[in-house]
Image: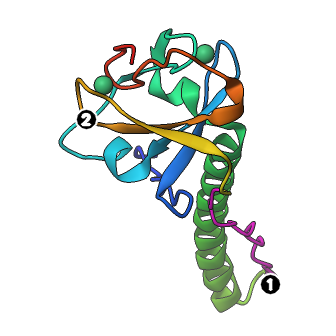
Amino acid sequence: MSEVTLSLKFEGDSDGYVTFECPFCESEFKLQAAEFQDEDNSFPELFCPYCGLPSEVNTFYSSEVVEQAKILATNYMYEQLNQAFGKMSRKLNRSNIIKMKFKPLKKINVKELKDKDTAEEIFECSACNNHLKVLYCAGVSKVFCPYCGVDQ
Ligand SMILES: [Zn+2]
Ligand SMILES: [Zn+2]
């Protein structure tokens, strides 16, 4: 089978921010979807704004996003199977030798990845001018920029 890329679209909250989760300290923060998905700037790594540790971008995806990716992959597989079996049953039924009944697999509903609004502080990085939202209640005195790792 050829390789397939399933693209996840991040919707974000009312300000267009999407939740991420640090793989080290499990704290949540938000990045502006437009900045994060900017095609001119791809970010192989992100820094946790709280502990400042860098890691690959996909390790920062929140469990909700990972769940979503799994659903997309499953649906894609079902679609392929449905197509293959649909074709096969049509062929067999035409031949009149074997009758094949085929019930297509039901796809899982993809719920929209909409982020809820929570009490957060918006920071703008003085080095790269990208934005991030950190949880206000986390009480952080120092915040690292997720893109360039500079502390604010
Ligand atoms: Zn962290
Ligand atoms: Zn920065």
Instruction: Check if residue 101 falls in the magenta segment.
Output: yes
Q: Secondary structure at mark 2?
A: loop
* Magenta span main SS: loop
Query: Is 98 or 146 nearer to us in this picture?
Result: 146
What residue sits 27% from the left and 46% below the top?
38
The crowd level at tag 1 (other Cα within 10 Å; few <14, some 14-19, many 20+) is: few
Residue under pointer 1: 99
Cα distance, mark 1 to mark 2? 64 Å
Residue under pointer 2: 129
| Quadrant of res 22 | top right
Instruction: Check if residue 32 falls in the magenta segment.
Output: no
Going by the numbered disc 1, the residue's amino acid type is Lys
Query: Is 106 or 90 nearer to us in this picture?
Result: 106
Rendered location of residue 35, percent (x, y): 32, 45
Query: Is 80 or 51 nearer to us in this picture?
Result: 51
Left or right: where 123 falls relative to 64: left
Is the residue marked 2 within 8 Å of ligand 2, measured from its CB?
yes
Q: Earlier in the sequence, mark 1 or mark 2?
A: 1
- Point out the stretch of residues depicted in magenta: 100-115
Seen in the picture, residue 23 relative to 29 is either above or below; the reply is above
